């Protein structure tokens, strides 16, 4: 198992920076006083396709040989990785084939269609996604770009914290959401190999706490159609991301559904930015673990902003 | 009637910059391709109290003599000016008294209360607001800071375009919403006296088109409880703002309620920022007048982001 290091992420950034936005790090005095710490929101909701996933997808797509690229790329994803891969493929001028679970938000389906991808729908389980994808891959000859069990994808995701640590000095804690662990892994590698003293946590919904349990027990637990509003975090870790998380993580903080909605609303109302439920999970983790973050300089990776505005939880 | 000029706005900025945020100018390639022009969104929704109004209010409050300031400030406002004045007064450490119409959004009422102001409620007409305010003013001895019929307030509002024109080169058009005309006036003065070739428009709801009719006929029309979702634009012009608008404006573009909701949703979904309905009015004006803006570099002042997330139009 080849594990990325900080240099791999720096190299990835040479490619990613050509296609992705360098997103702003926003702050709010009101939020700081409510959360009891100094928070820098790395706004990947302003990223292309509205999510950090474009970093990993573009790194993977532009690292393919011309021969492989010609047959296109394929994946399964609940939404943001799908849109990211479809756009990266469109920019490179190659076809993309996307397997989406039937419960993916409609705004995400429309986005994927808009980038010209061909969509295949399946049941919302890890097993069904993988089975359908294998069929598509064999039929088309496309290269499978896994949403997180992929060296280049993890390197790409790590470039968000590269930008954040480059811009904001003296951050003491970073926190991301964790679903499959791609963003968390990339963040861990870059941050810990840049500054071993920095603490890096992930927030995870209690109702989809497979990563928390996997880290605690040192074994992979599958996530079977978990009931959480954080639709981007319904996936489970893979051997690669678990290995990285075991090596570097300071902890995974689980949060209630109620606190996710509360944190989402807080950011909407006070920051005036649209974040999706998955992005509210780290904010909820700060709210539920005040002593860990008290008076610290904290970087929060806001993973995305793709929300169906006709179907809000408040 | 003393009319501000560009130098007055530059002087105001020396005061405003100490209290207000220099807000970012955001862009989106997708929005550009949908609107058919290159748009720079001046994000006053990220301003303190979530609206440009803090610029004018803080300029007015910090220009008061110590003797006048000691008795406090008072005003009537549908919301954002109220919050802005309350916060500016709190920063200076003086009392504030706010008359609010009974139909003001609850989020705006709560914000005003949160800054420590004393609130008085009245019927949602210009006449009722003025009558109640006069009563409060006499009782308290506080200085009335009008939301827009005020030299210092207009100068403060003009500092948003000062920052925008300073940051973004070669803007060809500016557009703001128009309610009472404070933001539009300040923008007109600064922009036209900086670059006589720049075009400056306002967007206004068809259902509250008193400014459009006042400019067309050269006379002031009162706005009587107009039925528009753009709650910040239900007020009417005053002699001072009409005079400035007559001198400099390239036009007022009126838009339907349906297009306001459509534009608001476009910005929410594509820019991932929260804007209030009033801020969507200029965007709707671009959508309904494509030939005016085609291929131009356009600055849009996003006036605010105070929306009741429990009561959305979509």
Image: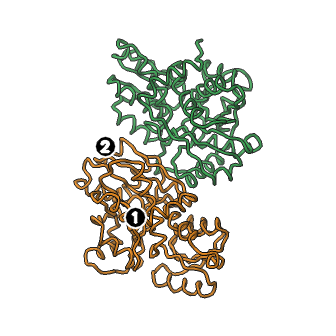
Chain colours: A orange, B green
Distance Cα–Cα, label 1 vs label 2:
34 Å
The quadrant holding residue A303 is bottom left
Residue B305: which numbered mark, if any?
Answer: none
Tell me the crowding category of disc 1: few under 14, some 14 to 19, or many 20 or more residues within 10 angstroms, Cα based.
many
Tell me the crowding category of disc 2: few under 14, some 14 to 19, or many 20 or more residues within 10 angstroms, Cα based.
few
Secondary structure, mark 2, is helix
Q: Earlier in the sequence, mark 1 or mark 2?
A: 1
Q: Nearer the viewer, residue B183 or B112?
A: B183
Quarter that holds the N terminus of chain B: top right
Quarter that holds the C terminus of chain B: bottom right
Secondary structure, mark 1, is helix
Relative to A298, residue A149 above or below: below
In the figure, is residue A265 to the left or right of A140? left
Which mark's residue is nearer the viewer, 1 or 2?
1
The residue positioned farthest toward the right in the image shown: B291
In the figure, is residue B90 to the left or right of A23? left
Q: Position of residue B208 (x, y in %)?
A: 64, 35
In the figure, is residue A281 to the left or right of B148? left
Question: Please, which chain is the residue tagged with disc 1 on?
Answer: A
Residue A6: which numbered mark, if any?
Answer: 1
Q: Nearer the viewer, residue B71 or A28?
A: A28
Q: Position of residue A276 (x, y in %)?
A: 46, 59
Q: Nearer the viewer, residue A261 or A249?
A: A249
Q: Are marks 1 and 2 on the same chain?
A: yes
Question: Please, which chain is the residue tagged with disc 2 on?
Answer: A
| Circle 2 residue | A33
Q: Position of residue B313 (x, y in %)?
A: 55, 51
The quadrant holding residue A215 is bottom left
């Amino acid at each position: 198992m080849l594990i990325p290091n900080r240099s791999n992420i720096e190299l990835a950034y040479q490619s990613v920076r050509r296609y992705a936005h360098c997103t702003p790090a926003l702050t709010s005095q009101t939020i700081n006083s409510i959360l009891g710490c100094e928070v820098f929101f790395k706004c990947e909701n302003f990223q292309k396709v509205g999510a950090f996933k474009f970093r990993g997808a573009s790194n993977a797509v532009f690292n393919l040989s011309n021969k492989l690229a010609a047959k296109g790329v394929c994946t399964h994803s609940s939404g943001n990785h799908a849109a990211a891969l479809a756009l990266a493929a469109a920019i490179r001028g190659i076809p993309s084939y996307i397997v989406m679970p039937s419960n993916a938000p409609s705004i995400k389906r429309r986005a994927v269609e808009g980038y010209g991808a061909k969509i295949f729908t399946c049941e919302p389980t890890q097993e069904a996604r993988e089975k359908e994808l294998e069929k598509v891959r064999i039929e088309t000859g496309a290269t499978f770009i896994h949403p997180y069990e992929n060296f280049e994808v993890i390197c790409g995701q790590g470039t968000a914290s590269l930008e954040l640590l480059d811009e904001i000095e003296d951050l003491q804690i970073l926190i991301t959401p964790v679903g499959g662990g791609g963003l968390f892994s990339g963040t861990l590698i870059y941050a810990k190999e840049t500054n071993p003293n920095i603490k890096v946590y992930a927030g995870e919904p209690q109702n989809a706490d497979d990563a928390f349990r996997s880290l605690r027990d040192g074994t992979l637990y599958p996530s079977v159609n978990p009931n959480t509003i954080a639709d981007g975090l319904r996936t489970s870790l893979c051997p690669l991301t678990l290995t990285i998380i075991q090596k570097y993580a300071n902890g995974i903080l689980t949060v209630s559904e109620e606190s996710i909605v509360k944190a989402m609303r807080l950011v909407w109302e006070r920051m005036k930015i649209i974040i999706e439920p998955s992005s509210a999970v780290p904010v909820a983790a700060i709210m539920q673990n005040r002593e860990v973050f008290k008076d610290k300089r904290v970087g929060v990776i806001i993973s995305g902003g793709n929300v169906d505005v006709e179907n809000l939880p408040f």
